[in-house]
Amino acid sequence: MLKKCVQCGTVFDAGGSDITCGKACSKERYSERKREYRQRPEVKEYRREHQREYLREYRQRPEAKARKREYRQRPEAKEHEREYRREYRQRPEVKEHRREYRQRPEVKEHRRECNREHQRASRIMSSLAMLDAMKQA
């Protein structure tokens, strides 16, 4: 029976329920349909959710945590992180948010307390350093 190939449009001798003329067209049609299937919104959402769940589980594995810790210790990773933070903090909306946050009374009080603690600790450390210097002299 003669049929027209749904992929390339050529007429071919079909053996049964064939709709493509050969392996090449069949493969092309399969990949095209697969691509169309993956573009459907419900399929995209399902795959996205599946990937999120898998990554959540993967990140909890000890070997993944160790690999991430090791990566973060590399100088180029630290530099990249510093650069990213610097660029992020330069955004106008982030600057505004940080300014507003620091103006809250509870945040101001917390920062004052932290600064007092830091000053106390630095005084103690400098006193200890002076004592050590006197002992060595």
Image: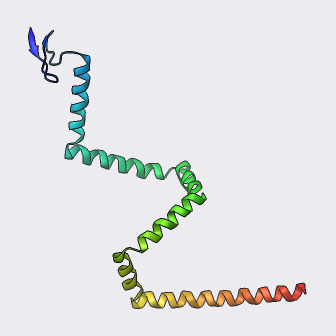
Task: List x then y, in percent, for residue 47.
Answer: 30, 44
Quarter residue 1 falls in = top left
Quadrant position of the C terminus in the picture: bottom right
Decide if residue 73 is in sight here: no
Which residue appears at 49% of the width and 87% of the height? 110
Q: Give the vertical position of 32 relative to 47 (above or below).
A: above
Q: Is residue 13 left or right of residue 130?
A: left
Q: Is residue 83 left or right of residue 123?
A: left
Q: In this view, does 104 lie to the left or right of 80?
A: left
Which residue appears at 16% of the width and 22% of the height? 8
**In the foreground, 17 or 31:** 31
Task: List x then y, in percent, for residue 37.
Answer: 21, 37
Task: List x then y, in percent, for residue 64.
Answer: 52, 50
Which residue appears at 31% of the width and 49% of the height? 49
Decide if residue 113 is in sight here: yes
Which residue appears at 89% of the width and 84% of the height? 136
Q: Give the vertical position of 102 relative to 94 (above or below).
A: below
Task: List x then y, in percent, for residue 89.
Answer: 42, 74
